[in-house]
Image (cartoon, rainbow, N blue to C red):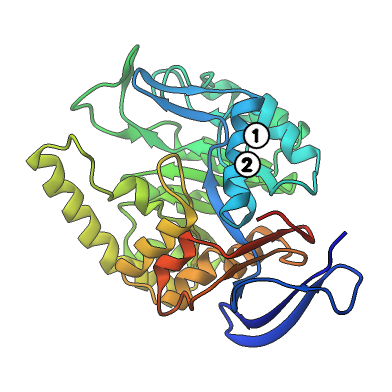
Amino acid sequence: MTTWVFEGTVLPAGGTARLTFGQDPTGEQLPGRYAVPGLVDSHCHLTFDATPDGPVLRGEDFAAERLAELAGAGVSALRDVGGNRDVTLRLARDADDGRPLVLAAGRFLAPAGQYFPRAYEPVAPEDLLAAVEAEIADGATWLKLVGDFPDVGPDGPIRGSKTRPTYDLELVAAMVELAHSRNARVAAHVDTDHVTGLIQAGIDSVEHGTALTEQDLEALGARGGAWTPTLSASVSPRPDETPERRARREERSAYLASVLPLAERYGVHVLTGSDVVGTVAAEIDMLVKHGLTVEQAITAASTGAQDFLGLSGTGNLVTYDADPREHPDVLARPAAVVLNGRRIA
């Protein structure tokens, strides 16, 4: 097997280094003079397919294609936050050096009528704790709580329906306590001010979080929590948007740009997540456009995420021909990718 050598600047710290992947001390030079020790997609759905008829869950082949795409983009690890549990939990249990590491939450946890009908199996409030036990028993290290959602009909969210909480906060607190007692953590989808109560109930990671306030970030940061804004999903333009929707999106974008720098101030771990519509490279670009420095955004997509998720960057590297701190767009064009010690691109 070929030994590969990188010599250049390693981000986000910015120091120079010589890194070797293989046994031969000489080896072959990797292209690129700037590198990151593997990217992390912290909000990913390997089996979630957004079809014209609404989201559906797919199987192993769909997940394999998605994993190959992520690996080629330099993603060495990902957190799947909801999907086809039979596929994602197996991927989490069965490590494979030929693909990115998978951390999985298993199924979406939401009651009837409050999530996409073809993408989940509803969990009644009285069954929530048992469902948590089942996911953890099958290998989940995260639980995906749908914290709030609009009312949903057979064809998806009902237009104009108000987003509302899914489970009462006392039950959520019991869920979090149970998860923590089993060494698992809770990520919560939330788009309203219900986020305040969810943080008080002890969730570990806010997903989307478009209504987070400075006080919420202070509370979340005080205990080392995380926020995955998924900006590509929440503030990217849509080709069919009406003027009213565009105005709401632009207002949401401006608000997020005002609070994202506060997350760094209060010690919240900001993470990057592609969700269903984005990429890690695009999310880094969006974070910079919404108030983070390039170094902070690259940290969110690499070493910061690795630290928060308990991962190691050893054996992973993605290189670039230009300095991403000066040319963030280069992050979408890796020069080389080393995954688990082997060059794959």
| Residue 93 on image: x %, y % | 79, 38
Query: Which residue occupies the foreground of this view, 326 or 292?
Result: 326
- Mark 1 lies on a secondary structure that is helix
> Is residue 206 at all visible to an observer of this figure?
yes
Residue 51 lies in quadrant = top left
Residue 96 lies in quadrant = top right
Q: For mark 2, what is the residue?
A: 67
Query: Which residue occupies the foreground of this view, 130 or 22?
Result: 22
Quadrant containing the C terminus is bottom right
Is disc 1 surrounded by few (<14), some (14 to 19) or many (20+) residues within 10 Å?
A: some
Q: From this view, report whether residue 149 is shown above or below residue 309.
A: above
Q: For mark 1, what is the residue?
A: 64
Q: From this view, report whether residue 290 is shown above or below residue 62.
A: below
- The residue positioned 60% from the left and 57% from the top of the image is 74
Amino acid carrying label 2: it is Leu
> Is residue 130 at all visible to an observer of this figure?
no
Residue 53 lies in quadrant = top left
Amino acid carrying label 1: it is Ala
